[in-house]
Image (cartoon, rainbow, N blue to C red):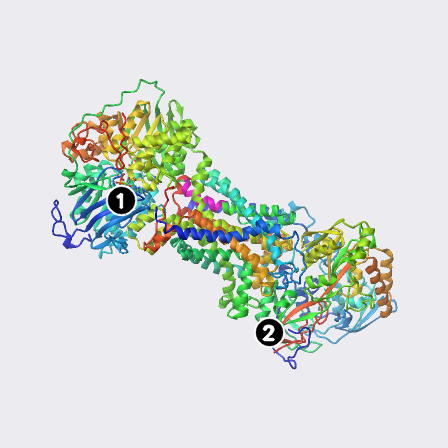
Amino acid sequence: MTAPAPRRPRRLLATGAALLLALPLTAALFGPLLAPLVTPADGAPYARGGGHPLGTDGMGRDVLGLLLRGGPSALGVATGAVALAYLLGGSLGLAAAASRHKAVDEILMRPVEILLPLPSLLVISVVGVGWRGQPLAIALTVAALNAPAVARLVRAAALDAAGSPVAEAMRMQGESRSRVLFGLLGRAVLPVAAADIGTRIATAVFTVAAANFLGLGMEPTSADWGVTVAGSREALLVQPWAVCAPAAMLVMFTVGLNLLADRLLAPAAEAGTAARAGRALAVRTQKAPK
Amino acid sequence: MLRYALRRGLLTLVQLAVLAVVVFLLTSMLPGDAAEVAFNEQAGAVQVDELRARLGLDRPLVERFADWSGALLHGDLGTSLAGHRPVTGILADSLAATLLLAAVTAALVVPLAVVLGLLMGLRAGTRLDRALSAVLLALTSLPDFVLALALVAVFSLRLGWLPSTWVGADSGDLLRHPALFVLPVAVLLARTVCLLSRQIRAGTLAALSAGYVVQARRLGVPRGRLVLRHVLPGAAVPGVQELARTGDQLLGGVLVVEAVFAIPGTATALVDAVQNRDVPTVQALTLLLAALALLVNLAADLVCHRLAPRTEVLR
Amino acid sequence: MSAPTEELPGEPTGEPAGRDPLVEVRGLTARAGDRLLLDGVDLRLAAGRVTALVGPSGSGKTTTALALLGEYEPGVRLSGEITVAGVPVLGSGGVTDRAAEVRGGTLAYMPQHPGSALNPARRTGAVLTELARLHRPEPGRTPAESAAAALAGAQLPYDRGTLRRFPHQFSGGQRQRVALAQVLACGPRVLVLDEPGTGLDAVTRLHLTRELTALAGQGLALLLLSHDHGLVRALADRAVRLEAGRVAAEGSPAEVLPRTAPTAPRPRPQSPPPVAAAEGLEVSGLHAWLRPGGRGRVLHDIGLRLAPGGCLAVAGRSGSGKTTLARCLAGLHERRSGRVRLDGVELDVLRRRSTAQIRRLQYVWQEAKGSFDPRRPVLDQVARTAVRLRALSPAAARAEAAALLDELGVPEETARRGPGGLSGGELQRAAFARAALARPRVLICDEVTSALDPVATARLLAVADRLRSEGTALLWISHELGLVRELAEHLMILDAGRVAEAGECAALLAAPRSAVGRELVEAAPGGQEPAEDRGPAAVPGPGPRPREQGAGRGSAQESSQRPSQRPHRGSSQGSGKAVPR
Amino acid sequence: SADGGGEGGGPPRRGGILRAAFPGFGAKETMDPHAQRQFVDMARHKAVFDKLVDLDADLRPVPRLARRWEPDAEARVWRFTLREAVFHDGHRLEAEDVLYSLARILDPKAPDHLARPSLALIDLRRSRAIGTRTVELVLKAPGAELPSLLATTGTPVVRRGYRDPREPVGTGPFRFRSFTTGRSFTAVRFDDHWDGAPYLDEIRIHSAATEARGSAVQAGEVDYAHEMTPTFARVVDGNPRVRIVSAPSSGAEGIALKTDRPPFDDPDAAMALKLLADRERLVEVVLGGRGGLGNDMYGKGFTYYPQGVPQRERDVDEARRLLRRTGLLNKKIDFYTSTAADGFVDAAHLFAEQAGEAGLRVEVRSGPPESYFTDMLTKGTLGSHRCGAMPIPTYLSQRLLRDSPQNATAWRHKDFDADFAAAQAVVDERDRGARYGRLQRTVRERGGLLLWGHPDWLNAVSHRLHGVRAAPPNTVDWARFDKVWLT
Ligand SMILES: Nc1ncnc2c1ncn2[C@@H]1O[C@H](COP(=O)(O)OP(=O)(O)OP(=O)(O)O)[C@@H](O)[C@H]1O
Ligand SMILES: Nc1ncnc2c1ncn2[C@@H]1O[C@H](COP(=O)(O)OP(=O)(O)OP(=O)(O)O)[C@@H](O)[C@H]1O
Ligand SMILES: [Mg+2]
Ligand SMILES: [Mg+2]
């Protein structure tokens, strides 16, 4: 594959996605160094302008200051929770898919399926009450809530690959279980996971924010982006920045993250060019390694 | 297939039973009880104790659970601790609106997600795909309540095209006012469609490179048919799994939607019940929702079983 | 059939002079990176004619066939000119927009690896009727009838059992025929068949030959891609031989396929030293079934013995349970009962075998393509065997894998690509190498030469011989009785999951006692072919598959030599290495 | 969006359906007027029932079904003379109906009857009907505040024999039509109401969450939205279709300091906190500027509120001095709050910031909102406090006596209780008012109540609706729909 043509838009897109990611990530990583630990409530509530470039929130705090501080928890708790959910649920799902015993599969998946229909709200309420305001507890809960769904998703995606001759051939070569699991099945799961992860993070951010509404989770005055969006929602028309700025950060983060994942995991640019070239349906390639 | 379905159906019953215990424990782990919550800010300890005794909350946990499950076996869901009326009444009141809403959403979500997912998958890498992906992702990253408020601000308050809430809507003839459904369903759809269509996009990409799709194309199966009959079944597997999960997603979304649009539904009832520590109502509602979720899961499993028959060899 | 009347069959031989050929290929060139896969190939297919495209594995047969549809494997670029039934498929601007018009209805292509070309989630009948409805809206004939005709043409029964099955519920050879039925269901005017004989037992193959002849007689143009010269001789009017992407010879099959003198029998590998009774593979009372609770039995009370260094061939009609037997022994098929003992040690199902046990019994998949991970280079996948089972360092394993592949005629450079970048025969050899690299005690080969040309077969056999001399026993599943005769000491013929007969190979082949045995032996390709085309051992009656020397080479001088003695170049890349031994 | 009643609308017009939206409470909502607890219940019950006595905007008792009342000299025996009123079923209001209602409220088997504790001083066995129009109530102890007690939550008069809450029959301006728990209520005009028939044909009172009330009133789907936030008031500012009717001083917002434990058992420590609070800022931020400054005494604007007490000003230096004196300077104390009410957490954080300026470290912790008000009675040293509109004596008796159920500041003083009891026996209103004033001042100086603000009560009203009076909740003109009209 020497044709450079399809590569350019892809690289461009990757750059675009990276740029989208860069802003929220930078804000999350370096913002806390720039902003004071506690954003002083020194302005009028929901004021626009007046020394505050992005106005103030309902407590009269500088929105920019909040924005700079609110990244780590907003991104950290949600991404951490989703990562953990994938770690737990993913391994469970893979193991269930790979087990050649119906019983093992059942033993692994049934408990998970009992948890699946538990309303997240109820669980969050209970945990939130027990360990009020501790990000770790919230992350763990959100992870636990997501793990069953992830397990099911991963299992379904891996099941076909697990029964394929490729998996058999690997076992015939004496490959370790984990390699079959995380190598072959993992890779079969990857596109599904990539499609899922970003939306799940976005959902997790707002599950955490929603937990706040119920008076659980984080302090309603915390600078967390999700919390700020939720807390200022009423002022959407009065002081739009208080809602839009943190929401924009979250949107940029999830969109950037997902586009990047799409790009990295599905080298579909060829498919795109082929489609443009008028082929009815494009065949995605397995690229020979360079 | 039938045997499989039967076995799964039985398992679902067991799951429900376990779930009942879990939910009971969870709700009783919440601080405060129905009596305490009932008098929050308004009454003293004496009255709270009296109410507690009257509601039977002073009895041990096990005894209360035994009572509750015993009654359940006779088809009695008990009496609400908050409203002192039968839980069935609460269920009946709240169920209609939510089910209607969920049904309309479900009827729309699948075709929409399939069309969008296929479109993105078939045009992967093109500008259309990127634009659609970005818009859909942005929609999921927007919290429901912001989306809902923004939609109301534009379509009801500014343009006046659509009703902003269900306040005053007659629950009897909701269906005669389709306009009522537009905004709530739009909010509910936003996230679920995105979740699903992304899975279908991923599945489509995978299916497109599969040998059988290539061969079908080489045999001149026309594009539309190829997509629907050859690409889609394979592409749908993760999507179906995702659909099974949208139950909880929807419940979360429904909560916001019900609040913003004043829809008296199950999600609101559930939150109320949790806040009121109204254990019988929480139990009944979660069991009901769980039963629905399990049913959807069961259906999803059966569909996947059919879509990936090769897995049968394994098991 | 849908072939227009003006293009009804002409004379069976000679140039289709004065008439527009159905397919016209001029100067077809294919490149992958800086490699030239095809170099100015010209080809014309006329109605009613059967053209054979022959040539060693990797010479570009599949690439040519795909190009007729305007298709190519990813990473390949085409140039040249192709017209199919008046429709330009490939022109100066590359593949034309109209290429899609010819697919299926006009020109139908049966791929080389039909296993992976069948939709795992769709039932056979549904797909066939769908295709028939699409391409053959014939009045007075329902799509179901067309589907039935297609199934019959592909030698499959038209019954519920076939129609309702999913692809994974067929045996390898049956899948091959399902794919063929799909192609036939399209009712095309040009039929392109890539190795249609693969996986077919002699009887079925015979029927298929007749069926295809009849189709040509109805005015279809046939392009046959095959290394099976028996089939080519039986069917083709003209033959085109490709070599390293270039047309090396063209003419009647008799001219293009070199007539080879009978060669001396290949020396048997010296009998391994006498062994203790407990050594080797011993199977008794093996039953296998498909569904839980012992329902759907496919194997009944199979017993066999295989001494170290020995070779037991298993033959039988397609679908008789050969692969299932192999998979039972390999521990892959878990629904089985009975005893499998290797060197006195009971073997459980694969997941309960120790690494050492896994190493000692290896299995080569019938459908090589499906057993490779499409995302990793073939070489790496092959080498993993040595890493995992023989604890070699990755570098050493790769070197050994590369050496073995080279010995089999697959250059390292080719093997570094993903499975998509290898030809069918190359993949098959890679699959063999993957198992052989374990240096197993027992190697189960499930139709491992079905996609190989004689040269490649010879190379593979050479490696097999070497393994045997090292004490590896072979369980050789094959439909090519000639090869079996040459290779195996013992033969077991399966029929519907039961042992129909078993015994000393040559004796059994000379005088089969069972009905199936007789049927197979009678139908074997040697039966209808000129004596000089027969295999090495001049056995009366049904001979082995023709094994022309130097089928991949042009020179008559080379072709008189035995493959194993001749200095030899890799099929298309020319590695210039001598075949060992 | 003009505040208050200064609106046009011309002369009242008859007819029309009024739709009103109140915060909903799901299964908790009830049609039993004696079990009413939520505003939405009270609004519905107010349409169907009447009380004997109600409260005016100054929280002074005003006659309703009772035309007038007079106590004996000791305020032990009270005579209430009833008005000519008819129940919706045609039955005329009689003394027996009043006694039945009181008996029902005081039913020992009904712990959810909210007024039971405060009316428990009525000795029912000795109370009696004098003819059909007069009721004589005998108290167990002197109770000069009986009329306002009869005006509290959960005291509507029901018809004799009333049992099934699903078929409420009252004397109110509207006749009950339908009720769906947690959702809506419909009632139609009762032409024979003693106070004259209402203008409206029908009222519908719906339950709706905050967002829904906001958009519904803006979109004109409801004409009256109860309990709106200051932010919403800003949103509709300048919107010609919606105006905010704001009732000033409708309660109190504050911080409760536990006076029975260190450090606030030392009144100086409590005083330090009262001095360091920046009340203006709290009102500006937490109440969105819609409220009055608090002076650490409950009931600003209500009857009996002591006049002439100077507004407490922020004095950081003095606060710092007191903190140092009591050893609190640079110490850390916990602030126990929750999201049980809007603004609690915000106020807590703001206060923590202000305390920090004076050298006191306040750490905010949140608890579960559902049981917060019960929890905070025992938990922590600092807590969020708020109170809706109620007469000052009621506040004193419910929050500041040793056996008060809601004694959030743990203010327990025998002499204080005795002074209050003495005031209850004083029939003369001025004298009684003076005594209440002294009690209030004591608490202001030595007690644990830091009341920094008195929020305005904000309701949103559409441009079609007229005659809505600005009145705090729990008063007669609040949620009163018999005197409003639509155009
Ligand atoms: N993407 C690619 N890049 C480089 N080389 C390729 C690629 N795809 C195929 N080839 C090479 O092209 C050659 C021709 O392949 P082709 O499949 O046409 O062979 P064939 O004649 O059909 O062989 P066989 O009989 O084994 O099927 C092979 O040597 C193969 O390795
Ligand atoms: N999952 C299945 N469901 C139903 N039938 C099956 C299934 N798998 C295999 N079979 C049937 O079992 C029989 C044995 O299959 P097997 O693959 O062992 O045949 P084979 O001898 O290897 O044939 P071939 O020469 O065509 O490869 C076949 O008739 C096949 O159709
Ligand atoms: Mg080929
Ligand atoms: Mg087979």
In the image, residue C519 lies at what x, y percent?
Answer: 21, 34
Residue lying furthest bottom? D11
Residue D406 seen in the current view? yes
**Dots 2 and 1 on the same chain:** no
Vertical placement of residue C387 versus D387, above or below: above
Circles 2 and 1: CB atoms closer than 8 Å: no
- Span of residues in magenta: A151-162
Residue A100 seen in the current view? no
Q: Is residue D399 magenta?
A: no
Q: Is residue A156 magenta?
A: yes
**In the image: residue C239, left or right of residue A288:** left
* Residue type at tag 1: Thr
Q: Main secondary structure of the magenta part?
A: helix
Task: Give the residue pinned by disc 2.
Answer: D241
- Sort mark 1 into few (<14), some (14-19) or many (20+) by Cα contacts within 10 Å: many
**In the image: residue D86, left or right of residue C391:** right
Q: Nearer the viewer, residue C51 or C3?
A: C51
Task: Give the residue pinned by disc 1.
Answer: C63
CA distance separating discs 2 and 1: 75 Å
**Disc 1 beta carbon < 8 A from ligand 1?**
yes
In the image, residue D152 lies at what x, y percent?
Answer: 75, 65
Q: Secondary structure at mark 1?
A: helix
* Residue type at tag 2: Arg
Vertical placement of residue C535 versus D357, above or below: above
Which quarter of the rendered image does ligand 1 occupy?
top left
Quadrant of the image occupied by residue D454: bottom right
Q: Secondary structure at mark 2?
A: loop
Quadrant of the image occupied by residue C468: top left
Vertical placement of residue C471 versus D485, above or below: above
